[in-house]
Amino acid sequence: MSEAPTSSARPAVADDAEERARAEVYGLLARLYLEVPPAPLYEGLRQAATEAPSAGAFLEGSWSALVEAARRLPLADVAEEYVALFGGVGKPEIALNGSWYLAGALNEKPLAALRADLDALGLERPDTVFETEDHIAALCQVMQHLIAGEGPGADTLMAQQRFFDVHLRSWSERLCAAIEQHPRADFYRAVAAFTRDFIAVEAQAFDLL
């Protein structure tokens, strides 16, 4: 990303540039939550602008904090933090799966409902992916596809709104709070704060439809 995202609610017919920016943010969040950031991505984040195109944009503060955290922390430290929070042997410190927050356990009914919706959209988990479909990264990838991809449901605001409300909005704030409150969180505290703000902007815009 070359500049900070803005925060204005989108109109019924969304601007192409704004939609590309939304898709890019979902793509970035997917990469950050899926794994330790690859070196080229992390370097790009360090070099990103921290000022939004328009003064006072809602996302400017948390975006600036995320970029500044990347500039402050070496990638090796971020890798250790990712493993401490989301990896390791057995149950991770922080679950990144929706079922955990919606049903209190992994692989529960919310995952089955999600799989049914993904099937209706013609989407399925690749064999090379081991995380379940309710992983936050996978859900961000679906949103990216619905905004900028092709096929059933893609580029349809109503499809985006339904998927967002049911499978992402319903639990993401609890995930962000869990990350922000964890004593080992540093870079990912900034990621969580930006995620929370971005989800709030998306929710506000969808509510205006």
Image: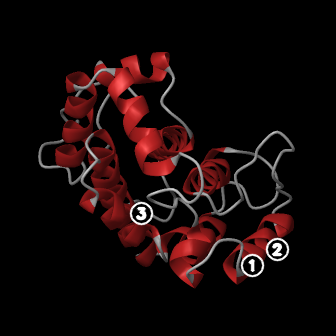
The mark found on residue 202 in the picture is: 3
Q: Residue at x 25, y 62 (%)?
A: 181
Where residue 106 sits, quadrant-wise, is bottom right
Please provide percent x and percent y for residue 149: 70, 45
* N-terminal label among 2 and 3: 2
The answer to the question of whether label 2 and label 3 lie on touching residues, with beta carbons closer than 8 A, is no
Q: Are marks 2 and 1 in contact (CB under 8 Å)?
A: yes
Mark 2 to mark 1: distance in Å?
Answer: 5 Å
Tag 3: residue type? Answer: Glu
Residue at (83, 45) in percent of width and height: 126
Does 44 appear above or below 92?
Answer: above
User: SS at mark 3?
Assistant: helix
For the point 29% across and 48% down, which residue is it? 185
The quarter in which the N terminus is drawn is: top left
- Which callout, 3 or 1, points at the residue further toward the start of the chain? 1
Instruction: Tell me how far mark 3 sits from mark 1, CA to CA.
Output: 22 Å
* 75 with respect to 17 (left or right): left
Total marks placed: 3
Query: Which element is circle 2 on?
Result: helix
Residue 82 in sight from this viewpoint: yes
Q: Which residue is mark 1?
A: 113
Neighbour tally class for label 2: few under 14, some 14-19, many 20 plus, Cα within 10 Å: some
Q: Position of residue 11 (x, y in %)?
A: 43, 62
Task: Please tell me which residue is depicted at 70% across the width and 51% down the height of the picture.
Answer: 131
Q: Which amino acid type is marked by label 1? A: Ala
Q: Mark 2 = which residue? A: 116
Residue that lies at the very extreme toward the left in this rendered image: 56
Please state which of the two labelled residues, at mark 2 or mark 3, is closer to the viewer: 2
Q: Is residue 9 visible?
A: no
